Image (cartoon, grey):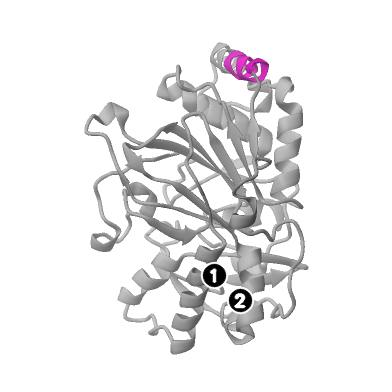
Amino acid sequence: MSDYLTHRVDDPSAWSGPAISNRQDWIVELTPDQADAIRAAVQAAKESGRDLLDLGRDDFPIPALADVIDGVHRELEGGRGFTVLRGLPIAEMSEEDAKTVLWGFGRHIGTPEPQDGAGNLVHSVRDTGARVETTDNIRSFQTNDPQRFHNDGCDTFMLMCRQTAKSGGRSRLASAVQIFNDILEQRPDLAKVLQEDFHMDARGQRPDGVTIQVMPIYHWFADRLSINLKLRYIHTAQRFDEVPPLSPAQKEAIALFEKVAEENVLEFDMQAGDALVANNYTIIHGRTGFEDWPDPDQRRHMLRLWLTLPEGRPLPPVFKGSREFGASYARRMN
């Protein structure tokens, strides 16, 4: 259990969506020369003869993007916490080549980690037609449902848009740090509740078979505020007999969190060739529901990596072995 945080966190990771919605400094537009460098890197990766998951940084050489990559790292830790890269030249590429772009670029940001109990390192984010409420292991990214605010696993995620939906599917981001600051100002008692244990459904993704994870939503550790937000899975965990009902204070804290998150949201449309890179400890994200195209070849398609950063923050011990952050903890903290 981390110590309770009882003061504001004032640094660049605390921002309000309405305050930055009319700015473009969080979008990095690639130049034509940089797009050509990515095409050349895909060709170099093919010529290496290596399988996708065996490709290292040297197999995907992009020296023309060194400043872009440095800028991404600065924003992830010590900055705003996210960047949108725009203009990745994947429209003309096959799905396999697009995966190579994601993987190769991601290898310059961090180390890919498993995203599920099966150990998969690359996820296709598509609507499978399944529903979270009627299964024990389907996760929200496999549906066309609106996604409540949450964070992914490991230090950061990289989500690349290959194809957009017919309508909807808008990306939604918010600063978990700003939300905490606002809750602390309005209801310090509920800021404390959010730093106490909640039961979260592991969705059948823990390799050790553990079905429920117990930890706070907010963690103050080593002078860093980190979040693990799984509101939907806090509610689905209630189906287990051993999970206690949410207390009135917990329900009130969750309701206030969602209210404040909506007040701070940054909402935007991702375009084909965009890649969102975000810090999972300071940024929460979601999306609006969407309607897909009838043609399967046109349907909304995102590709995703979870990454451990080379110089990431210290992590609270409760993250050890967790579904979301166990891999990053093991790589950096053990």
Q: Is residue 326 left or right of residue 75?
A: left
Measured as percent of width and height from the top left, residue 333 is found at 71, 58
* Number of numbered discs overlaid on the protein picture: 2
Q: Quadrant of the C terminus?
A: bottom right
Task: State yes or no: residue 106 in magenta.
Answer: no
Measured as percent of width and height from the top left, residue 73 is found at 72, 42
Query: Disc 2 to disc 1, how far (Cα)?
Result: 7 Å
Disc 1 marks a residue whose amino acid type is: Val
Residue at point 31% right, 48% down? Answer: 144
Residue 67 lies, with reference to residue 14, above or below; the image says: above
Disc sitting over residue 260 in the figure = 1
Q: Earlier in the sequence, mark 2 or mark 1?
A: 2
Q: Quadrant of the N terminus?
A: bottom right
Measured as percent of width and height from the top left, residue 138 is found at 32, 54
Nearer to me, 11 or 5? 11
The stretch of residues the image draws in magenta is 32-40
Residue 203 lies, with reference to residue 49, above or below; the image says: below
Magenta stretch secondary structure, dominant: helix
Give the residue pinned by disc 2. Answer: 183
Q: Are marks 2 and 1 in contact (CB under 8 Å)?
A: yes
Image quadrant of residue 148?
bottom left
Measured as percent of width and height from the top left, residue 310 is found at 73, 44
Residue at point 64% right, 25% down? Answer: 30
Disc 2 marks a residue whose amino acid type is: Ile
Residue 297 lies, with reference to residue 134, above or below; the image says: above
Camera sees residue 216 = yes
Residue at point 71% right, 25% down? Answer: 65
- Category of crowding for the residue at label 2, using alpha-carbon neighbours closer than 10 angstroms: few (below 14), some (14–19), many (at least 20): many
- Category of crowding for the residue at label 1, using alpha-carbon neighbours closer than 10 angstroms: few (below 14), some (14–19), many (at least 20): some
Nearer to me, 214 or 92? 92
Question: Helix, strand, or loop for circle 2?
Answer: helix
Image quadrant of residue 17?
bottom right
